Amino acid sequence: MAARGLAMAGDKSPWGNTGKGDEPGDDSPGADRGAGGGDGPRNPWLPGGGEPGKRRSASIEDIFKNRGPEGPRRAGGGPGGPTFRLPERPGGKSWMPVILGAVAAIWLVVTSIHFVQPGEQAVVTWVGGKYSDTLDSGTNWTAPWPIQMVEKENVTQIRSEEIPGTNTEKLILTADQNLVDLSYLIRWNISDLALYKYQLSDPRNALLEIGEAAMRAAVARKSLDTVLTGEGRADIEQDVRQRMQARLDAYRSGITVQGIEINKTDPPGRVEEAFKDVSSAQQDADAAINRARAVAQQLLARAQGDASEFNNIYAEYRLAPEVTRRRLYYETMESILSKTDKTIVESGNVLPYLPLPELKQRSQAQPPRPQGE
């Protein structure tokens, strides 16, 4: 059985040819059957589907000549119509090199020219992120992307950071061992873009931490009353700004602190009512002290005026003692008698006592009579 199978395999190949008709030009019956005249299947690699008389080896050009991305093309072009071809230049040359050159030139110009706006700066980095240069405002040239990359930043913009955030309590210890809930605002801008980008890993976070440390150090030198009443706020703000700028310059951060503004100084929430009572009592005490000072100033001014008047009278008395004495007597009697409602007239034709002021008061109290009565 095994020998019979080998014999059958040797007599006829899978392509319908015998061993004798494998070479080109073989006129044996096996060759005709392999070409399409026999009972076996046709050779798919032969042009024309294995028609007689056209047997030859297929080349790569024959296989891919009429094939596209979508499959075999039709005689007139692609699967659905004619094939698109670029127009040729005079002399039979292609336009493809010219188009590629134009695209490369546009890419070179667009990625090499950089317009930096006023108030901005830009840092230039090589491939891999290595720092190269800093560009000022205006028109600047660099190597094309991705050889060099440019990153712009506004360096004149005043930025602000609020510490702590909204509805967050920040307790700071004062010099008299009390706690105060304090919030403040940091205004800053970029002074050196290269240092800001590459010196610190997180410059904004460093700014916040330095600001908090400086604020705690400044408040720790003030008493609670000074911080709450606002008398020492200007000193605290100036102290914090100086401390922050010194530390940022030591770190070479490229940041300039423009100012510190304290927004809120309140007692802790758990003892806020007690602090309000203390503050109210302090305000009442301050009001009483101010009233006492006002009265003292009035009394002092009056005493100083009386002393000055006495000195003037004494100087006149030294010049004319009798005239001055009589004038003082008349002024004293006038000031005393002006306060009494009795009048004494020394004459024999009238009553010894005539209550003129009372009669005058009665006449003023009675309503006027009508003229017809």
Image (tube, rainbow, N blue to C red):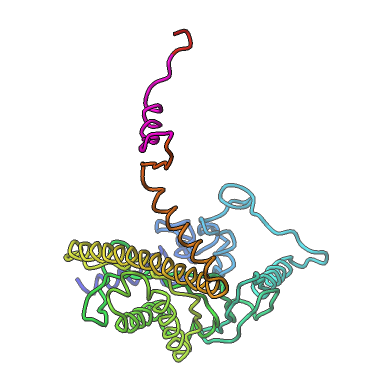
**Residue 174, located in which quarter of the rendered image?**
bottom left
Q: Is residue 258 visible?
A: yes
Q: Nearer the viewer, residue 109 or 94?
A: 109
Name the residue at the front extreme.
348
Which quadrant holds the C terminus?
top left
Is residue 43 left or right of 102 when viewed as pictured? left
Q: Nearer the viewer, residue 211 or 14?
A: 211
Q: Nearer the viewer, residue 256 or 172?
A: 172
Task: Give yes or no for residue 360 being in the magenta stretch.
Answer: yes
Residues drawn in magenta: 349-369
Q: Is residue 25 visible?
A: no
Q: Residue at x 27, y 70 (%)?
A: 181
**Percent of width and height locating residue 19:** 41, 72
Name the residue at the bottom extreme.
250
**Residue 346, located in which quarter of the rendered image?**
top left
**Percent of width and height locating residue 314:** 50, 73
